[in-house]
Every structure is written in structure tokens, then in C-alpha cells.
Image (spheres, helix red, strand yellow):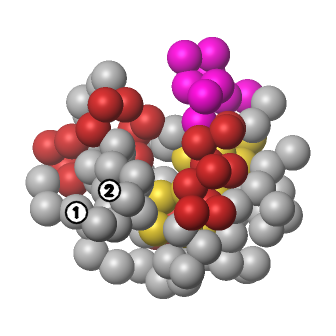
């Protein structure tokens, strides 16, 4: 089992979760974080650190977000050179985006 970052992270990208990860499993995209399922050791340290409750064990992910399992896998590979190891500034307007829903279409996958 690995942990998965889901929709609430889009346009927020708080990095408190990544700063407590003992194995550097987090990858950073333009407006989202992903967890590399092959690096994640299922320690649960990241979950309570996420202010928007975007991180779930893959077997407890809400049904509407099940596609984030594959998305985290694919994006963590795509963003392999973008490790997140410490807390950085959240995105501008992150607090405004934190409570919004249905943000799937806003996910930016490429740094280009």
C-alpha cells in the first residue's frame, strides 16, 4: 500500500507533508504534489501534516478520486527530478482554493 495525493491539493500545493517524509517520496508539479508509490514506505507521517486533507492510503481513497492512484504513479515518474524535501511557500491563493471542489480539470501536468 502507498499513500496518494488527491484533488484537494490542486492549486494549493502545501508542502508540510513533504517536509516530514523520511524517504523523499514527494514530487512537485506546477500546481500539485504527487507521491511516488515505489518510494513511499507507508509511514503515515504525511497525512496529519496536510492542511487540506488531500492524502489517503490507496485502499481508503474515496471512489471519486480512485484515478489519483494511477495519476500519482504517472506524475511521480514524470516529475522524477522535482523532489520536494522541505516546506516551501504554498501557491498564491492556496487558502482560497483549499475548500473548492471539482478541480480535476485544473491540474497542470507539465512544467512547460
Which image quadrant is residue 110 in? bottom left
Circles 1, 2 touching at the beta carbon (< 8 Å) = yes
Quarter of the image with the N terminus in it: top right
* Element marked by disc 2: loop
- In-image side of 53 versus 9 (left or right): right
Which image quadrant is residue 41 in? bottom right
Residue 77 place in picture, x, y as percent: 65, 63
Quarter of the image with the C terminus in it: bottom left
Range of residues picked out in magenta = 60-68
Residue at 67%, 39% (x, y): give it: 70
Q: Residue furthest front?
A: 112
Q: Name the residue under label 2.
A: 31
Asked if 25 appears above or below 94 in the picture, the reply is below
Residue 17 place in picture, x, y as percent: 53, 65
* Element marked by disc 1: loop
Specify few, some or many for label 2: CA neighbours under 10 Å numbering under 14, 14-19, or 20 or more. many
Residue at 12%, 54% (x, y): give it: 93
Residue 90 place in picture, x, y as percent: 27, 66
Asked if 57 appears above or below 33 in the picture, the reply is above
- In-image side of 6 versus 98 (left or right): right
Specify few, some or many for label 1: CA neighbours under 10 Å numbering under 14, 14-19, or 20 or more. some
- In-image side of 55 versus 43 (left or right): left
Q: Nearer the viewer, mark 1 or mark 2?
A: 2
Between the residue at mark 1 and the residue at mark 2, the CA separation in whole angstroms equals 7 Å
Residue at 27%, 75% (x, y): give it: 89
Q: Mark 1 points at which residue?
A: 91
- Which of the labelled discs sits on residue 49, or is there none? none
Residue at 56%, 55% (x, y): give it: 75
Q: Does the magenta stretch include residue 65?
A: yes
| Residue 55 visible at all | no
Amino acid at each position: 500500500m502507498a499513500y496518494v495525493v488527491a484533488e484537494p491539493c490542486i492549486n494549493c500545493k502545501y508542502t508540510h507533508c513533504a517536509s516530514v517524509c523520511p524517504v523523499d517520496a514527494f514530487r512537485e508539479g506546477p500546481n500539485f504534489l504527487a507521491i511516488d508509490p515505489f518510494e513511499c514506505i507507508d509511514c503515515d507521517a504525511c497525512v496529519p501534516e496536510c492542511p487540506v486533507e488531500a492524502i489517503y492510503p490507496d485502499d481508503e481513497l474515496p471512489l471519486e478520486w480512485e484515478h489519483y492512484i494511477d495519476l500519482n504513479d504517472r506524475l511521480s515518474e514524470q516529475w522524477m527530478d522535482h523532489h520536494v524535501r522541505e516546506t516551501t511557500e504554498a501557491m498564491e491563493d492556496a487558502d482560497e482554493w483549499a475548500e473548492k471542489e471539482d478541480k480535476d480539470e485544473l491540474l497542470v501536468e507539465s512544467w512547460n
